[in-house]
Every structure is written in structure tokens, then in C-alpha cells.
Amino acid sequence: MNVTVFGTGYVGLVQGAVLADVGHHVVCVDVDAAKVERLKKGEIPIYEPGLEPLVKENFVAGRLEFTTDAAAGVKHGQVQFIAVGTPPDEDGSADLKYVLAVAETIAQHMERDQIIIDKSTVPVGTADKVRDKVDGVLEARGRKDLRFDVVSNPEFLKEGSAVSDCQRPDRIIIGTSSKQTEDVMRELYAPFSRQHDKMIVMDVRSAELTKYAANCMLATKISFMNEMANLAERLGADIEMVRQGIGSDPRIGYHFIYPGVGYGGSCFPKDVQALIRTADDIDFDAKVLKAVEARNEEQKTTLFQKIHKHYQGNLASKTFAIWGLAFKPNTDDMREAPSRVLMEALWQAGAKVQAYDPEAMEETQRIYGNRDDLTLCGTKEAALRGADALAIVTEWQSFRAPDIELIKQQLAQPVIFDGRNMFEPRRMAVKGMTYYSVGRT
């Protein structure tokens, strides 16, 4: 099938590459000419495991193309994916200007019946707005003879495992009331449903809400565990034991119940805020979602609070090594990352930072530029040299088995502030470390 994807970010590029890999002929359209040229050369603008060889292989095979020519893209695709960003507006709602701009572009250039697929995470009712936009442009063109359908097909990709999530999806949500459109979508996704039918078909608005409900549920689990961690600290309990105790209940499970310093990234914060805004717009008080957001914002400050308390507020002359800058492992994404909250609080208190992350160094440089109070180090060991203490913010695999004796030698004091509970407190005590974690005494 000929497929067009508008947008080459996390969602569009991964979806386009995976569809091309199973044999579809995919054209990815982007307005950024420089980005398109880099993609043609095999230069991937994001770090995502497995994505680079997938893009290169399918580009060389001719199944995956990149262009800025929107008209050519519309002409090519039997289906048109909208996979552009929906950044949060000032009030927290999802900004649909890019989605609607693509809808307008498709309507301006379409010369045959089309299926338009909302792949971007969008609020309930967006398909209606896309439909109205396309209708208006077609009417202005005098082409009301052209028929189209707008489908909600939300993505459920996790940064760091987006390729495998796309290749082996748990479910494929399709929002449409048209049997003809459903048949086309089944053909499109047939290679991903060979063992059993993974497609769940529903009305458009339910599909749109499903995406938000899924992310908000996962965010709720994280905030709940962080709330329990704060209780555990104050009650003298061990949140890791509690986690094992409740995770063994199959009704709860172990996924997303790891306490830490809060969630970040491009999805959870934005989607929780957007659904709260949607609720406000219909005069519904989303009390649970507001509590989830409030707990997460406060949780991002807990590591600094522990540091501040340990040093009795005297941070002006201190230097802190930070391991982990990305909001999670296996990505270079620093959007809403807890590391940013910690670093900015340390700088505000007059402290300096020596930081290391396996993938997010360039992104950190882009965000903060050159600062006297920030040193980006080439290795995790280099970040330790001359620092007063170590703070761990992201649970990269390479941080799990450190040389504790080297850490003690390099730091001015043997102190670790662990925001991800990577080590056993008793082992750290035996090794002579002063060790702070989350929800553990």
C-alpha cells in the first residue's frame, strides 16, 4: 500500500520506517528541509534504539522516502497519516495548529477519495475539527465530490522501545464508523496481526479518549507509588518491599510502580495537563488527574530537598556530580526531565554541576548553552572528580554496577543521593557511603 506520513518526529519517523519495513511504500513529508536532507543521508535526528538501521535499510531499498513536497505526498498515499506535534498551549491544552495545518494541506492537494489518519495524540473532538477543516477547503475548491474519512489511530509507543512497540503492538486502536475504512486499516496493519487480531475498532471519540486515558492511568500509578514512597520514609517502612508486596497481586502488577523523582518526557506531563483542560472546558473537576499532576511536580523537587537538608542549606560552595539527564533511559529526550528541576535548583542555590548522560549531552548543551556552573563530562567517572556528592537521576543500565571505592575516592565526601533506588541501602552503608534514596530508611 502507498502510505504518506506527515511529520518525522518520534511517532512519524518510527511509524513510517516500520510500515516500510513490512513492505508498504512510505513517503514521509516534513516542512524542515534541512531535516529531510539529513534523513536522506541516513542521519537520524533522535536517539531511538534500532531506528537508524531500520531507516537506512528501507531508504536504500526505496520503500521509505523523505520530502518537503506536500503535494507529492498527498498524491502518493492511499492513506494520509498526521503525525505532527501537539505541544501544550499556555493553558495546558493541546495546540492543534500543526494538525489542522496538515489537514488543510491534504485538502488543498487531494484529487481522489482519501483516508486521513490522526496518529498524533489529540483531544477528544479533534477528528471533527479535522473533518471541518477539510470540508471547508474542499468546498472552497469546488471539490465537494471528493470523499474522505477521518480515522483516530493513536500511537502507544514508549521512548526507548518505540521501534519494538511499533513492530509488535499490544493493540491497534482504530476509531471509525465506516466499514470500508475499517477494511483498509485492517489491510494496512495486517502484517502486525498475523498471530492474533490485535485491532480494536470503536467510534472516533472513544479512540481519541483511549490514548489520553492510557497515559493518564500510567501517570497515576507513578504518582501513587511516589506518594507511598513519601509515606514509607516517614513511617519507617521500605517502599521496595511494599512494591514487591503489591506488585505480586496480579490485579496491580509490577509495571509503572517504581518510585523515583517523578515522570517527565513528551507524553505523560502533556497528556495529563491536556485532559485536565478538556475536563475544565466541560465544567468537570478532574480531581484525580489534578492530584496526579501536583504530586509529580512536587516529587521532582525531592532530591534537591534531601540535598538541601543534608548540607543544612549551605550549597553555595558545593559541586555535585549528576548521573543521568534524559527523562528516562534509552533516549536523549529532556522534555520535563527531573534532572532539569534538580540542576536549576542547585544553580539557584549557588552550587555547580558536573553532569554525564550516555545520550543526552548534546541536548543538555542545546538547552543550557555554556555556563560557568555546568560542566558536561565525557564519562560517569569524570563527573565524579572533585565533586562533593553524587546525585543519580536517570536509571541507565551502565549506572547499576559502579565502582563504589572509586566513587569514594573521587568525591570530597562519600555521599550519594539516589533518585531511582538503584542500590541496596545496607550495601551502601557497609561500603561506607552515606546513601539517600526514595522511600527507604
Image: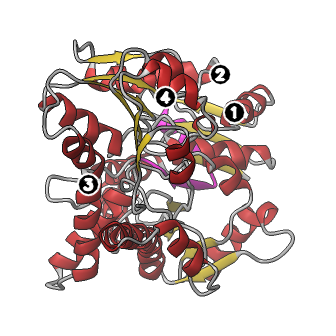
**Which of the marked residues, 3 or 4, is nearer the chain's N terminus?**
3
Please, is residue 233 above or below residue 303 in the view?
below
Please, is residue 43 above or below residue 161 in the view?
above
Please name the residue that numbered disc 2 is placed on.
42
Q: Nearer the viewer, mark 2 or mark 4?
A: 4
Q: Nearer the viewer, residue 393 or 20?
A: 393
**Which of the marked residues, 2 or 4, is nearer the chain's N terminus?**
2
Q: Nearer the viewer, mark 3 or mark 4?
A: 4
Query: What residue is at 66 percent from the left and 72 percent from the top?
Result: 171
Q: CA distance from mark 2 to mark 3?
A: 30 Å
**Which of the marked residues, 1 or 4, is nearer the chain's N terminus?**
1
Which residue extends farthest right? 195
For badge 1, the amino acid type reads: Val
Q: Does the magenta run of residues contain 79?
A: yes
Please name the residue that numbered disc 1 is placed on.
55
For badge 4, the amino acid type reads: Asp
How many other residues sit within 10 Å of disc 4, few (<14), some (14-19) or many (≥20)?
many
Q: Secondary structure at mark 4?
A: loop
How many other residues sit within 10 Å of disc 1, few (<14), some (14-19) or many (≥20)?
many
Please name the residue that numbered disc 3 is placed on.
95
**Which of the marked residues, 2 or 1, is nearer the chain's N terminus?**
2
Q: Position of residue 26 (x, y in %)?
A: 67, 42
Taking the image as drawn, is residue 147 in sight?
no
Q: Magenta residues, as a range?
A: 69-84
The quadrant where residue 414 appears: top left
Please name the residue that numbered disc 4 is placed on.
357
Q: CA distance from mark 2 to mark 1?
A: 7 Å
